[in-house]
Image (cartoon, coloured by chain):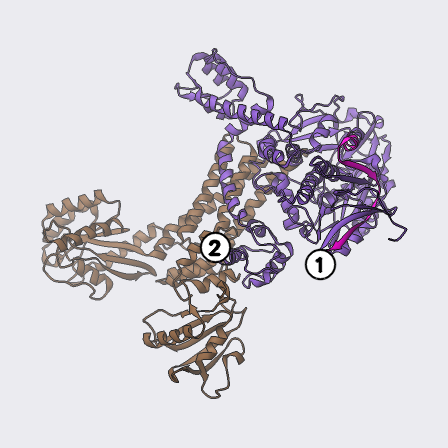
Chain colours: A brown, B purple
Amino acid sequence: MMQYYEDTIAAISTMSGGGGIGIIRISGINAIDVADKIFVDTKRAADSVARMSTHTIKYGYIINHETNQILDECLVSLMRAPKSYTKEDVVEINCHGGYAVMHSILALIYKNGARPAEPGEFTKRAFLNGRIALSGAEAVMDLINAKTSEAHKAAISQLSGRLDNELNDICEKLSLCLAQIEVAIDYPEYEMEEDTAQEAMNTLERIEEQLKKMSATYSRGKIIKDGFKVAIAGKPNAGKSSLLNVLYGSDRAIVTNIPGTTRDIIEVNIDVDGIPIIITDTAGLRETQDIVEKIGVDRSYIAISDSDLILYVIDAQGNTEEEKELLFEISQRYNVPIMTIINKTDLIDKKRETELFEVFSQYEPIMISILSNQGIEEIFNRLRRIFTEKGVYMNTENIITNERHKKLLDSSIEAITKAKESYKNNMPIDCISYDIWECGKYLEKITGKSIEADVVETIFSQFCLGK
Amino acid sequence: MDNKYFEYYDSYDIAVIGAGHAGCEAALAASRLGYKTVIFGINIDSIANMACNPSIGGTAKGQLVREIDALGGEMGRAADLNAIQTKLLNKAKGPAVYSPRAQIDRKRYQMYMKNVLECQENLDLKQAEITRILVEKDESGKQYVTGVQTHLGGIYKCKCAIACTGTYLKGKIIIGDYSRNSGPDGHFPANELSECLAEFGHTIVRFKTGTPPRINGLSVNFDKMEPQYGDEQPFSFSFDEYKSDLEQVPCYLSHTTEETHNIIKANLDRSPLFNGAIEGVGPRYCPSIEDKIVRFADKERHQMFLEPMGSDTQEMYMQGISSSLPEDVQLAFVRTITGLENVSVMRPAYAIEYDAIDARELKLSLESRIVNGLFCAGQINGSSGYEEAAGQGLIAGINASRKLAAKEPVVIDRATAYIGVLIDDLVTRGTKEPYRMMTARSEYRLVLRQDNADARLTQLGYEIGLISQERYDRFRQKMERISNEIIRITETHISPSATVNAYIESLGTAAIKSGNTSLLDLLKRPEITYQDVCIIEDMAHPENNRKELSFREIEQIEITVKYEGYIKRQLSQIDQFKKTEGRALPQDFDYSKIKNISLEAREKLTKIQPETIGQAGRITGVSPADITALLIYFNQNPTGETKK
């Protein structure tokens, strides 16, 4: 049996289903060997990957020697250990990006001594071989999944170790603070000049503020990473699907004038100022006997409760009383902000418009006409206003995008809270020093300086294949 | 056999080299466990000599002494019976760091310990310098101990040897330009043994330590100094609460002056510490006075404590003023210290250099990984301090005995005792300077307290065989009284009567409102002591029949109740620790087999051969990533597949 980390792994490194070029990565002790079994140099058949210098590229063919069949023409690049992503020998095959081509090459590679990489295994090896820190490894995962430029920026910042730097800096301050207390404890016979505990409290106060700031970036970080979820809701035939299409910029949902056309959830991703927004179109909210439509309605309510914002669409020609009632009910039932939109204003007169505006005034409705493309920009403006209020645009040094990090940050803040409480309650300094120690321990779990084996396994199992 | 040598007419199970604090504990443990033991001292008029401070205990060290006592060692009892002042330090800083310290009559302590060794069954005390440890090789080529050889050519056969050589190995004292090969206090050095250890393959390092001048107390103007008295309520280190019948005396606090600093600064070029004559590495936490003046140049004065050397001598020890400056400089600056204007110096301060081994070449049992049957304890392992030495000596003595009994060695982990922290630090991380125990070195000090040392270790001491059945029974009864009383105060409730509330408010805390308040709830308040709780109970329930508890029992109840929240958090940390500590690693494993750990980690792991994953993680140079790799590797190959 081969040993766990002494075998060779391979996977497609580029997104599936896209691109004219695809990259297959092979990493491990036999990477060069495997590549040589399937690669031929176009000019000199005797040349091999093994004879390449590190960090060079060679042109040639991928060939199945058993059948003598050429699978693709390609470029092969070689990164010898330890100067590679995984710190192992790495061979990358740049081939054509079609599904069939790439998978037949991959199958050939598996046949010749590599095994399929587990999710995140390349990065796991990079971590285990000491090339990147734990938070860096987590950043790679975020980077791969980044849907927008902001998410990308946050991940890059984390990968470059900026989060680590800030946390290490805090940990250093904590240990200085501890050191002062320890001196007072271990040298009781010597007079100390300052009030050690008071001094420590002042430092903690500052650290707490810094940690709280970091923790607060999570609401922004979460939006950047996971997207801002918007659910379009309203009564049947209010124009919800049309709104989705116009926000998306092309027809995604089927639009008819038959109420109840949308029966399942439709989801699209758009990008506003680099912030990912996930819009779901839901089935119209009404009592129905149709069993399929009823399931759709139920799902609508789930989507609504799960969203960050509800776009409630009202038909300008509809029954004002019924709309008012439903809107009130939704606003009471879900703890989700609502943006109220009155559609089809092209079909009503000014008087009706004023009347509607007054009836729904507490919801600050936006008057739009999808048909005549009026008022759509106002929806985006309101979204931007929400983002501003949530601090999404704020340009802070480090943004917390990872839930694990957020939880640990909060635990470290809690430890400081305990220290302050103990100080207030006249608990002795050895207790307070414990709180400070614990605070640092939580932070070290983010940077990976302090480790629990099961955490590592969980983090890496979430990685997408390839990296 | 060469006729220069002769074989002693007796053979022994265990030979202990050195009769200092480590050697005494090692020899007593081994002989008390039934093994025929011999202990050698270079000069048996100075057994268990306190070559430095005439005191035992202090921060972290007091905890060590309590632990030694709980495991069945001698130091606690010896200190109790020869104390001339006792004091609990750090009373304001929290129960985890309460630290008992006793000033000791140094000569009487030596005589006491000598007598204990002499009277001990299975133990012979001999004056000799050991120049060689004799070894042979087994089939696999590994060396094992067969005996020891004295400077006079005597060969003593033994199965295990315990080296407790203190500062004697190639000892060299330095006073200014003057230096000579010497042990401490004018005793012979041991010049040959470290070469023998080097031949075996042990790495020899050179350390340095220092000691201050001793003066005649009759020449001191005490009026200019601040007396430092012991506690009204004397304490004992030992579970058996032995009490000294010696007269209790004060120490005195004074300070250096500007003039002191000027003299020292003007003579720094004559200091061997700064002109390069001292090559050994000294302890940073215990700097000489010249070192303090250079490093803390802006400090106007430094403290000095005068400690009595005993009850039938006038000699006093100048704590805080260790030095290696020339004698004339010493004599000049000493007289500039407040109250010492006319002082008569009896012995000058000196620095001493000595050889030690790299303790990373030992197992956690303190047995050498190079020579089977050779154990090392005390300063030879890089530690400093009497208590550190005694703790190691005790463990080495126990484990040498267990080796002969073919039993698993006793390894105490970091979450159980300071002794565990001490040995783990030395063996796992090694030390670049003389290692002193400090409470800050323990991650779990809220649990490793001086008050509960017996609760942590008596069971183990009993199982090892050093705690008698009689004492063990008394210990069990004590524990039972404590837990019963905690249950009782939890279940006893108080109604908010006027008298009760008046008393509670007089303590500076809020009155109680409901009858649901238990005595335990009250005791949790920082302002209320157990004694107050008793007063309150007497007011509310005069009919209750409360059992009288001892001072120590009350202390433990108070700490357990008041710090419950913190102790619980610490215990959950310990659970985490035990998980990694519980994962054993194969021994004599070739770490070059694990490819994806760093080169440095591979070398260190191969050298140190950690016994658990937890220990591996504490080795400097082994990163968390390396540990993850180890975890994964040994999950796949639990035994490491093939051994070297």
In this rendering, does residue B181 appear at all? Answer: yes
Side of B542 relative to A339 (left or right): right
Q: Which residues make up the magenta segment?
A: B112-140
Tally of numbered tags: 2
- Does residue B271 show up? no
- Residue B428: x, y in percent? 63, 50
Quadrant (top left/top right/bottom left/bottom right) for the C terminus of chain A: bottom left
Quadrant housing residue A398: bottom left
Q: Amino acid at mark 2?
A: Leu
Chain for mark 2? A
Q: Residue furthest top?
A: B543
- Crowding near the residue tagged with mark 2, few <14, some 14–19, many ≥20 C-alpha atoms within 10 Å: many
| The one of B122 and B106 positioned closer to us in this rendering | B122
Q: Which residue is mark 2?
A: A163
Alpha carbon of mark 2 to alpha carbon of mark 1: how far? 53 Å
What residue does disc 1 label?
B141
In the image, residue A384 sits, relative to residue A58, either above or below, namely above
Amino acid type of the residue tagged 1 in the rendering = Gly
Chain ID, mark 1:
B
In the image, residue A116 sits, relative to residue B190, either above or below, namely: below
Mark 2: which secondary structure? helix
Task: Between label 2 and label 1, give the one nearer the viewer.
Answer: 1
Mark 1 crowd level (few <14, some 14–19, many ≥20, 10 Å Cα): few
Same chain for labels 2 and 1? Say yes or no: no
**Which mark is drawn over residue B129?**
none
Mark 1 residue element = loop
The percent position of residue A441, horizontal first and vertical second, equals: 51, 46
Q: Position of residue A292 (x, y in %)?
A: 14, 55
